[in-house]
Image: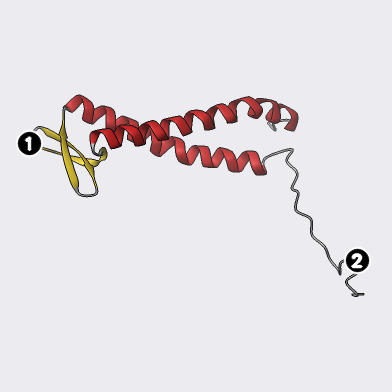
Amino acid sequence: MAIAPSYFRRVSSFIVPTFFGLTFLNFFFFLSVTAYLGGAALWGKEESGRYYVGSHGHYTEVSQRVFECSRVHGLSVEITMPLAMLIGLVCTLGPGRKTNVTFSHGSKPGSGGA
C-alpha cells in the first residue's frame, strides 16, 4: 500500500520536528549526565559487584542503579541518533519531495559556447 505524498507531508510536518527535538534533547542530556558522572556505563565496567562508568580510560564508581540508568540512557541515544538520521534522509528524499538541483546540458547563456 502506497502512502499518499500529501499525507506523508502532513504527518511528517509534525512528527519529524518533534522527534528531532526530542532526540537533540536526549543527546545533550546524555552528554550532561555523562560529564556529571565522569563517564557512561557504555564505556564502563562491572567488577566483583561494583559498578564503574568510564570515560577515556578513567573509571568512576557508581551505584548499580545509576549504572543501569546510564546504560539504558546510552542505548537510547545509540538507537535514536541513527534513527533520526534515517528519518531525515527519508524526509529529504521521500515521496513528494522535489530536488532543487538542476542539471544543464550545454553552455550557459553568454558564455560564448555553442
**Residue named by callout 1:** 48
Instruction: Note whether 6 is above or below 43 in the view shown.
Output: above
- Give the quadrant of the C terminus: bottom right
Taking the spot 24% from the left edge, 34% from the top edge, the residue there is 37
What is the quadrant of residue 39 in the picture? top left
The amino acid on which the numbered mark 1 sits, given as a three-letter code, is Ser
The amino acid on which the numbered mark 2 sits, given as a three-letter code, is Pro
Say few, some or many: other residues with alpha carbon within 10 Å of mark 1 (under 14 / 14 to 19 / 20 or more).
Answer: few
Left or right, residue 89 beside residue 44: right
Say few, some or many: other residues with alpha carbon within 10 Å of mark 2 (under 14 / 14 to 19 / 20 or more).
Answer: few
The front one of 102 and 36 is 36
Left or right, residue 105 beside residue 57: right
What is the quadrant of residue 104 in the picture? bottom right
Left or right, residue 30 beside residue 22: left
**Residue named by callout 2:** 109
Sooner in the amino-acid sequence: mark 1 or mark 2:
1
Left or right, residue 60 beside residue 34: left
